[in-house]
């Protein structure tokens, strides 16, 4: 096997009568591709469900996985919280404002102007300790608090990176996987080693408008019984999804910890295969699992297999797998990039140069890739 610089994950997942990801009008997100309109699931939607999954393979179950919080209210909700109860508002306000400007930039005191920012546990802990120190030093004097906050801000403004200097996971595990962009402090940015494509149906969209009512259980005979009349959209489809992991980038973001990187890949693969994105849980039960999963490890630039579905195919997993297999064989003949492959499939058939196995087999394979790459580098 070539050095496993990149891990590529391809999946096919079916959903029926669901509304997985909505646009600003409340309709299913769509994508024109190959001359037909497809239903789409955004990468943000997929990543959010994977990173927040309450699951036996959740990312928060991994040993050494620091938490992170993405919010515009981190200072009030996590840094200050209940810690500063009883502190006079005239003392607390300049300190709070200094923290907001340091984290969110010059307009940080205005909630509407703040960036929805990701901070790791270590950064929150640092800010909380600094807030407590400043409050203690102010000793109940509002003027003293204002001077202390002003001096503190001078040393921390536009330097969010300093909050977590030397920390292994400054943005928590979420930041280490999916990156972080801080417009007020580019030095605090974290490059994302996990790249997620928008998933789309391998066939033309299948959608309908669903008319429904909320019935009044205590309605009289002369009443209609329909208290609410609404309409929503439901879609069905077989989705192709694609994920790439830059393994050296992942190792770098995890402080070179190959064990932690392996555990991350192991659990992430389970989440990709088993965790469903989607809203309207109570009325559509949009729960499914991947019908097909292909993982590839190699040292050449990754490439999506979306081209296999530019010409839409029937909404059938066996047909879609056959179409993907044919496209993969064509790529192999032209490029011969030599990726090591494992696949799981609910459909019959083989893939070029790929060993078939269960999800556990594939997860074990990807779990060992970071250690293999670290051994090669050593």
Image: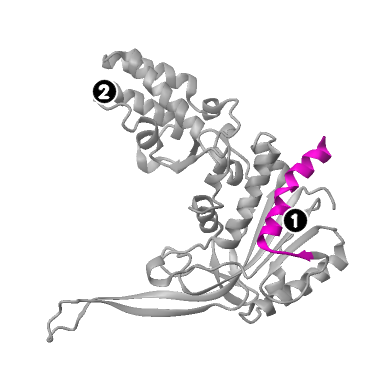
Q: Mark 2, residues whose alpha carbon is within 10 Å: few (<14), some, or many (≥20)?
A: some
The residue under the point 86% across, 62% down is: 335
Depth check: give the residue in front, 195 or 322: 322
Magenta region: 355-378
Depth check: give the residue in front, 200 or 124: 124
Dot 2 lies on which element? loop
Q: Mark 1, residues whose alpha carbon is within 10 Å: few (<14), some, or many (≥20)?
A: some
The residue under the point 33% across, 28% down is: 83
Q: Tell me residue 135's x, y (percent).
A: 33, 19
The residue under the point 74% across, 60% down is: 303
Depth check: give the residue in front, 126 or 72: 126
Q: Which mark is residue 302?
A: 1
Residue bearing the label numbered 2 = 87
Q: Tell me residue 276's x, y (percent).
A: 52, 63
Say which label, 2 or 1, has the lower sequence index.
Answer: 2
Dot 1 lies on which element? loop
Q: Which mark is residue 322?
A: none
Q: Assess whether mark 1 and mark 2 are in contact (beta carbons under 8 angstroms).
A: no
Q: Quadrant of residue 131?
A: top left
Depth check: give the residue in front, 193 or 376: 376
* Left or right: 320, with 23 as reference point: right
Q: Quadrant of residue 94?
A: top left
């Amino acid at each position: 096997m070539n050095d496993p610089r990149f891990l590529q994950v391809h999946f096919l997942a079916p959903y029926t009568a669901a509304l997985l990801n909505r646009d600003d009008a409340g309709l299913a997100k769509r994508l024109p591709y190959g001359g037909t309109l497809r239903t789409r699931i955004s990468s943000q939607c997929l990543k959010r469900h994977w990173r927040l999954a309450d699951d036996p393979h959740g990312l928060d179950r991994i040993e050494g996985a620091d938490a992170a919080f993405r919010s515009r209210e981190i200072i009030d909700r996590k840094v200050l919280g209940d810690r500063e109860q009883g502190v006079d508002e005239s003392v607390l306000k300049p300190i709070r404002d200094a923290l907001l400007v340091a984290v969110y930039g010059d307009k940080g005191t205005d909630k509407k102007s703040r960036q929805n920012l990701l901070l790791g546990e270590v950064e929150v802990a640092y800010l909380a300790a600094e807030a407590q120190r400043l409050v203690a030093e102010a000793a109940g004097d509002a003027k003293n608090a204002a001077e202390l906050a002003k001096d503190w801000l001078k040393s921390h403004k536009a330097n969010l990176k300093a909050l977590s200097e030397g920390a292994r996971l400054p943005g928590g595990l979420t930041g280490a996987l999916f990156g972080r962009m801080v417009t007020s402090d580019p030095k605090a940015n974290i490059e994302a080693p996990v790249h997620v494509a928008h998933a789309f149906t391998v066939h033309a969209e299948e959608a309908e408008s669903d008319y429904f009512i909320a019935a009044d259980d205590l309605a009289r005979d002369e009443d209609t019984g329909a208290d609410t009349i609404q309409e929503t959209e439901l879609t069905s489809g077989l989705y192709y999804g694609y994920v790439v992991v830059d393994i050296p980038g992942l190792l770098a973001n995890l402080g070179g910890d190959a064990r932690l990187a392996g555990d991350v890949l192991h659990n992430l693969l389970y989440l990709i295969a088993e965790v469903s994105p989607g809203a309207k849980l109570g009325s559509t039960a949009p729960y499914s699992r991947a019908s097909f999963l292909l993982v590839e490890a190699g040292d050449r630039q990754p490439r999506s297999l979306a081209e296999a579905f530019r010409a839409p195919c029937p909404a059938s997993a066996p047909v879609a797998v056959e179409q993907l297999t044919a496209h993969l064989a064509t790529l192999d003949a032209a490029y011969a990039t030599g990726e090591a492959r494992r696949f799981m499939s609910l459909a019959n058939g083989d893939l070029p140069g790929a060993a078939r196995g269960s999800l556990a087999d594939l997860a074990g394979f990807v779990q060992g890739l970071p250690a293999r790459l670290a051994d090669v580098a050593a």
